[in-house]
């Protein structure tokens, strides 16, 4: 399986060829753990969630490492199999004793799972744990802002999105989140300005154009739940 050791060659393959070779990798009895892990990470990078699940399930049976539990949980979460992903992350959590990047990611993913399950208090708990480990993470800040929106705490979501756009003004999704927060605070003029800023940064953002249409005078105020899909 020397072919899989050449990352550059593999990445130049078409998606169909990549998927076929990764599937074959699982059936190759000569593939060692290092090659399997590399194939699994490639599957994760390219959103081949089911293939990644199969590879890391195989690795977990063979060597029982915490990284395999984490990667399996990640592949399950991206398939929205939240209960199974939660079990993987909680088991991985019990095996980590020292602060590390992996611990941060597990806590963040657990927060995301509880948001999807509408268990906002648990989501807050795990996001806070992740924040303690990596307070500068923009991804975490974005998810915490989304949580505040779902809790209808518009002042706090607006505050968090403001912090994100101040530190990284190029992030169009943060401007979109800020626009939604301002909209539900009753400041439609600033909301539209934020929405226009999002479109300046990402002119091809179809969701922002759809939201702009919904906010036109001919439409009624759109319920909050309808806005979340524009941030996904």
Image: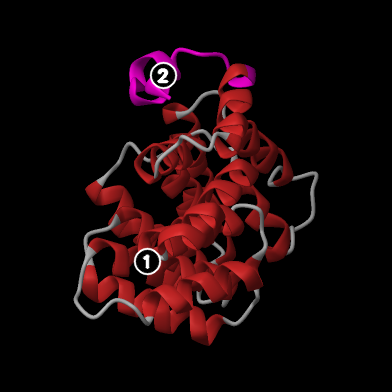
- Structural distance between the alpha carbons of marks 2 and 1: 27 Å
Query: Which numbered tag is attached to residue 91?
Result: none
Q: Give the image location of residue 43, x and y in percent.
A: 51, 37
Q: Is residue 13 magenta?
A: yes
Choose between 207 and 124: the one closer to the eye.
Answer: 124
| Residue 32 versus residue 19 in the image, above or below | below
Query: Which numbered tag is attached to residue 66?
Result: 1
Tell me where the magenta segment starts and ends, as one range: 1-16
Q: Is residue 190 magenta?
A: no
Q: Residue at x 40, y 61 (%)?
A: 63
Residue under label 2, please give it.
3
Q: Give the image location of residue 136, x and y in percent.
A: 22, 60
Most extreme residue toward the front is 30
Q: Is residue 96 left or right of residue 54?
A: left
Secondary structure at badge 2 equals: helix
How many numbered discs sit on the rendered protein? 2
Secondary structure at badge 1 equals: helix
């Amino acid at each position: 399986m020397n072919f899989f050791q050449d990352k550059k060659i593999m990445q130049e393959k078409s998606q169909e060829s990549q998927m076929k070779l990764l599937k074959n990798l699982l059936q190759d009895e000569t593939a060692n753990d290092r090659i399997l892990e590399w194939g699994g990470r490639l599957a994760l990078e390219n959103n081949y969630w089911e293939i990644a699940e199969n590879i890391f399930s195989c690795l977990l049976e063979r060597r029982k490492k915490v990284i395999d539990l984490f990667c399996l949980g990640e592949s399950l979460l991206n398939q929205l199999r939240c209960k199974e992903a939660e079990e993987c992350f909680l088991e991985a959590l019990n095996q980590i004793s020292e602060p590390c990047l992996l611990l941060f990611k597990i806590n963040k993913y657990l927060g995301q799972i509880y948001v999807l399950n509408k268990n906002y208090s648990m989501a807050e708990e795990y996001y806070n744990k992740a924040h303690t480990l990596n307070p500068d993470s923009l991804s975490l800040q974005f998810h915490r802002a989304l949580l505040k929106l779902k809790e209808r705490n518009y002042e706090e979501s607006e505050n968090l999105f403001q912090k994100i756009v101040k530190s990284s003004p190029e992030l169009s999704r943060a401007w979109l989140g800020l626009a939604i927060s301002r909209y539900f605070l009753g400041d439609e003029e600033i909301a539209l300005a934020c929405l226009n800023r999002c479109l300046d940064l990402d002119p091809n953002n179809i969701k922002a154009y759809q939201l702009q249409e919904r906010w036109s005078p001919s439409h009624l105020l759109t319920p909050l739940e309808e806005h979340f899909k524009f941030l996904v």
